[in-house]
Image (cartoon, rainbow, N blue to C red):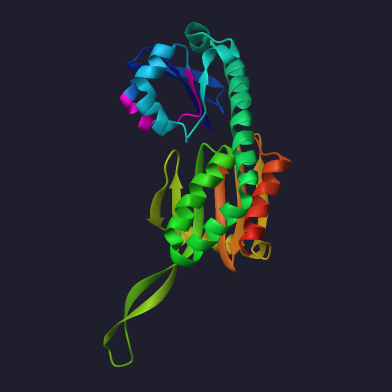
Amino acid sequence: MIISIGFIRSAGQVLIKELDCLQNSTSTKIIDVTDLADENIQGLFIDDNDHFNSLVGILEKEKSYYPILEAQSENLTLSQFESMGAQAFKDLFFKISARWCMHQNFTSLENMYGLVNHFKDLWKKDRITFFEEMWYWFKRNVGATDLTIVFNDVISSEEKDENNEKKDRPKLVQSLLTGTKKANFHQGGAKEKELMQTYLDKFHEIFEITEFAPNKFQFVATAQVERSPMIFMARVAQLNQFQRSLLAAIFNGLQ
């Protein structure tokens, strides 16, 4: 898993520090603030109110993706951030990620009734939008750096009937929403079909975490809504019991 955190160094530039968790190595780069929208970062520090005021339009769009924090809240300066070692950087990420996820979790809990009804309505009226919004909600609430949802879909397939005439017929396929900061829709193939078969015996549960390997930051869960199966695959730093219960509550409510 790659962890990325930014620090605004001027009104026009952001220092991005990255940690490769498996290699335990860090690297830095400088980007233009206008490129923030294309960066999959897990947090952003600000150390100057003038910078914040000049960038408020950009930051307003970014705040739904990750926490935006005052550097003083962590007694952090730009030079300290830039020279931070791998373990200290990892500890900083765990700290701000846990707080961010907890805020998202409590917000979801406080709005559970409306949230479940909203997802129920989308499930009936607009299945693709359901998965898109579920992707963003799921990612925020577990603090995933990337997320993939595999699900069954129905497309129109042209086939010949017994009279050799072409007819449009429904065909069951697998589709997926996948991405880091934003989700992209793809139609699956043999790999996704095989994946559904692999987890077939897990779909008797409404929601189940089938795999979580903290040392590899890998997380897999299966779920179903009205017997329609789906698989969630993500990279997460940690997963506590509150998050597990929240995810189960959402899918229990959707039945």
**Quadrant in the picture for residue 58:** top left
Of 233 and 242, nearer the camera is 242
Q: Is residue 1 left or right of residue 172?
A: right
Is 80 situated above or below 122? Answer: above
Q: Is residue 197 left or right of residue 55?
A: right
Q: Position of residue 73 (x, y in %)?
A: 58, 15
Q: Is residue 164 magenta?
A: no
Residue 237 visible in the picture: no
Q: Residue at x 31, y 26 (%)?
A: 34
Which residue is outermost to the left? 165
Of 183 and 49, nearer the camera is 49
Q: Which residues are magenta?
A: 34-45
Residue 47 visible in the picture: yes
Q: Residue at x 34, y 14 (%)?
A: 11
Q: Position of residue 117 (x, y in %)?
A: 57, 58
Is 110 situated above or below 83? Answer: below
Which residue is outermost to the bottom? 163
Number of callouts in the render? 0
Of 116 and 37, nearer the camera is 116
Q: Is residue 164 left or right of residue 222?
A: left
Q: Position of residue 210 (x, y in %)?
A: 67, 52
Q: The N terminus appears in which quarter of the rendering? A: top right
Is 55 situated above or below 242? Answer: above
Q: The C terminus appears in which quarter of the rendering? A: bottom right
Which residue is outermost to the right? 241
**Quadrant in the picture for residue 38:** top left
Q: Position of residue 138 (x, y in %)?
A: 55, 46
